Image (cartoon, rainbow, N blue to C red):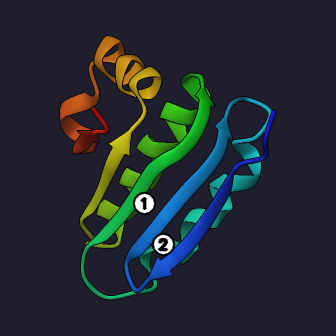
Amino acid sequence: MSQGQLLCQSSGQFSLAGDLSFETVPQLVDAGAQLFQADGQVCIDLAQVGRSDSAGLALLVSWLRLARQQGKRLSFRQVPPQLLGLARVSGVEHILLLESSV
């Protein structure tokens, strides 16, 4: 299992790396506060995300809620197939603005 990491690439551009699971997500929840310090749109690249479970999906939903509370637009790109499948099954794919990596 690899710890999840949120890395700032440039203003408003982030990448998320590692596993998104019940074990790794708790330390990432508060990291979301740094996402919305920049002006404008925020985009998170998920190309380096490994294994994901429903906790990973819940993390994305919580960050989206935080973005909306702060009047920001948040999108996700290069979403791994496993996480995209969870979003589809859960019925939240359309609200998360997910862009598949396929």
| SS label for mark 2 | helix
Using the image as rendered, state which of residue 7 and residue 31 is in the foreground: 7
Q: Quadrant of residue 11?
A: bottom left
Q: Is residue 102 above or below residue 34?
A: above
Q: Tell me the kind of residue under disc 2.
A: Leu
Q: Position of residue 18 (x, y in %)?
A: 67, 45
In this view, the residue farthest toward the top is 89
| SS label for mark 1 | helix
Q: What label does residue 35 carry, if any?
A: 2
Q: Is residue 61 left or right of residue 15?
A: left
Q: Position of residue 2 (x, y in %)?
A: 79, 41
**Residue drawn 74% across and 45% down?**
26
Cβ atoms under marks 1 and 2 closer than 8 Å: yes
Q: Is residue 97 left or right of residue 60?
A: left
Q: Is residue 46 left or right of residue 59?
A: left
Q: Is residue 98 left or right of residue 25?
A: left
Q: What label does residue 66 carry, if any?
A: 1
Q: Is residue 15 above or below residue 80?
A: below
Q: Is residue 94 above or below residue 27?
A: above
Q: Position of residue 55 (x, y in %)?
A: 61, 30
Q: Position of residue 7 (x, y in %)?
A: 59, 69
**Residue drawn 31% across and 88% down?**
39
Q: What label does residue 20 carry, if any?
A: none
Q: Tell me the kind of residue under disc 1.
A: Leu
Q: Earlier in the sequence, mark 1 or mark 2?
A: 2
**Residue drawn 39% across and 24% down?**
81
